[in-house]
Amino acid sequence: MLGDVLLITEKHEKAAEKILEHVLKNKKDKYIIAISGESGSGKSELTHVLAKMLRKKGIFAKPVHIDNYYKVLPLERTEWRKNHGIANAVGLEELDWETINKNIDDFKNNRKATMPCVDLVTEQVDTLITDFSGIDMMIIDGLYAINAPDVDLRVFIELTYHETKKAQAVRGKEPQNDYRMQVLEKEHQVVQSLKPLADLFVNIDYQVVKAK
């Protein structure tokens, strides 16, 4: 997303190095990595660092942020959620999975793709055109990223919103109030339901471990 704030630290670099080792051992043509976790858990930071590390290995990896694919525009989302009830509105169905699936297919078939891109300053959605020919890997990150189809490696960050409140406040994407806490709790429930899909976990200490 345009205007996103990344707070990259040593823990992100160390975790990315471990994930990189796994990727290099198992890589194939048109490899897809998905990184899921709750708000403030470091998904975007981990994605960015991993993509840069892959580039140093001569591998072009394109980050794709699931947050760009919400059906309801950012300026309208709060009101929409309140009108429909947070318990019913927040979750997997908020995302445009048809477009996500199409862009994944575009990547796999080396096509030019039209992709949404949220500008966090204006809170509007721009259109991004990406040429996937010559792109070796796609790294999808977001709350529900590991729910995407055709993923080769699914990474789950185990930090919950309870542990990441400070990071959320620093990033300042949304105000921290009672409404936001209700949204985070519902997102927590949905994200945790995807945990069994993971191949690798980044635990609370930010160490990478394989799923059992």
Image (cartoon, helix red, strand yellow):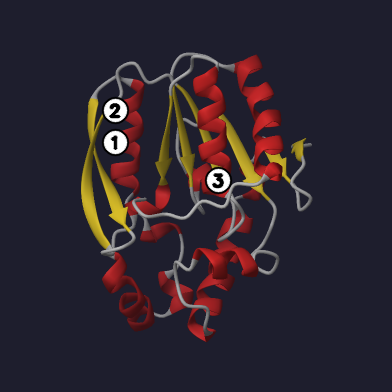
Looking at the rendered structure, the secondary structure element under dot 1 is helix
Horizontal relation, residue 156 to residue 119: left or right: right
Given this view, does label 1 or label 3 mark the residue nearer the observer?
3
Return the residue at label 3: 45
Number of marks drawn: 3
Residue 99 locus on image (x, y percent): 28, 43
The residue lying at 70 percent from left, 42 percent from top is 10
Badge 2 vs badge 1, beta-carbon distance below 8 Å? yes
Query: In the rendered image of this protein, does residue 144 appear above or below residue 130?
Result: below
The answer to whether residue 84 of the structure is visible from this angle is yes
Return the residue at label 1: 102
The residue lying at 62 percent from left, 39 percent from top is 155
Q: CA distance from mark 2 to mark 1?
A: 6 Å
Looking at the rendered structure, the secondary structure element under dot 3 is helix
Residue neighbourhood size for the residue with mark 2, other residues' Cα within 10 Å, grouped as few (<14), some (14–19), many (≥20): some
- Lower sequence index among marks 2 and 3: 3
Q: CA distance from mark 2 to mark 3?
A: 25 Å
The residue lying at 43 percent from left, 19 percent from top is 136
Looking at the rendered structure, the secondary structure element under dot 2 is helix
Query: In the rendered image of this protein, does residue 113 appear above or below residue 57?
Result: below
Q: Quadrant of residue 122?
A: bottom left
Return the residue at label 2: 106
Image quarter where the C terminus lies is top right
